[in-house]
Amino acid sequence: MKNKGFTLIELLLACAMSSIIALGIGYMMQASSENYAGAQTEVSLQSDAQMIMNNITDYIQQCNNLYYDQADHLLTIYYSINPNDSTYPQVLAWLNTTNKKLYICKITDEEDPLASTFTTSAFRSSDEIEKYLLAEHVDSFECDQQNYNGLQGTNTTVHIKAKMALGDSSYELENTVKVRNRIESNFRSVAEEEEEEEEE
């Protein structure tokens, strides 16, 4: 009885089928890996956005006034703790639209070095500001100043919105915050303070 082997055509067909199967498996693995990486990025962006909202919400709820400079992307949150000083303490949140990083710092009084340096271009371009980094990949951060700025009274609400973006993934989160304290109108914004210094 003769042993019949494979013909050349059969071997070629087998190799072709194996290559097609291998390419299909490779493509499925690559797609699965990319989908997993994309899902991880979206989860990370959602987590960072929620962390931003939680931090800013906590600061706003306890404040007595706030001012959002749209041109500078700077949010200043004021607290009426010291009756002799209506400007401090305060919290500053600034978005660097170039590197998409959001920074936040607390300033206790006018003697605090940050009171005169945080808004300067020299400090913002230095490595020192990285100590105040809150989140990266912040595509935009906005605060609706129409509802509260300069108003006295209670039941004031503030609308804030943040958008995170990295690669093809993005995530937006909005929140309306109710200010628990009475809004005071005798606070000076950072922009107003700088204008007064220039006039002097």
Image (cartoon, rainbow, N blue to C red):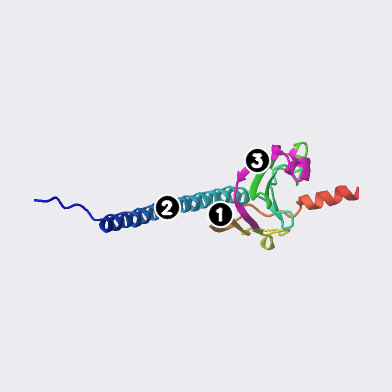
Looking at marks 1 and 3 on the same chain, the residue that comes earlier in the sequence is marked by: 3
Q: Which residue is mark 1?
A: 167
Q: Which span is picked out in magenta?
A: 114-142
Q: Nearer the viewer, residue 194 or 103?
A: 103
Q: Residue at x 82, y 49 (%)?
A: 194
SS assignment at label 2: helix
- Judging depth in this view, the residue of 125 and 119 nearest the camera is 125
90 above or below 72? Answer: above
Residue 81, percent across and down?
69, 43
**In the shown orientation, is residue 183 left or right of residue 24?**
right
Measured in 3D between alpha carbons, the distance from the residue under mark 1 to the one under mark 3, in whole angstroms, is 24 Å
Which type of secondary structure does the marked residue at label 1 adopt? loop
- Residue 38 spot, x, y in % from top left: 48, 53
* Residue position marked by numbered label 3 in the rendering: 132
The residue type indicated by label 2 comes to Gln
Residue annotated with mark 2: 30
Q: Residue furthest left?
A: 1
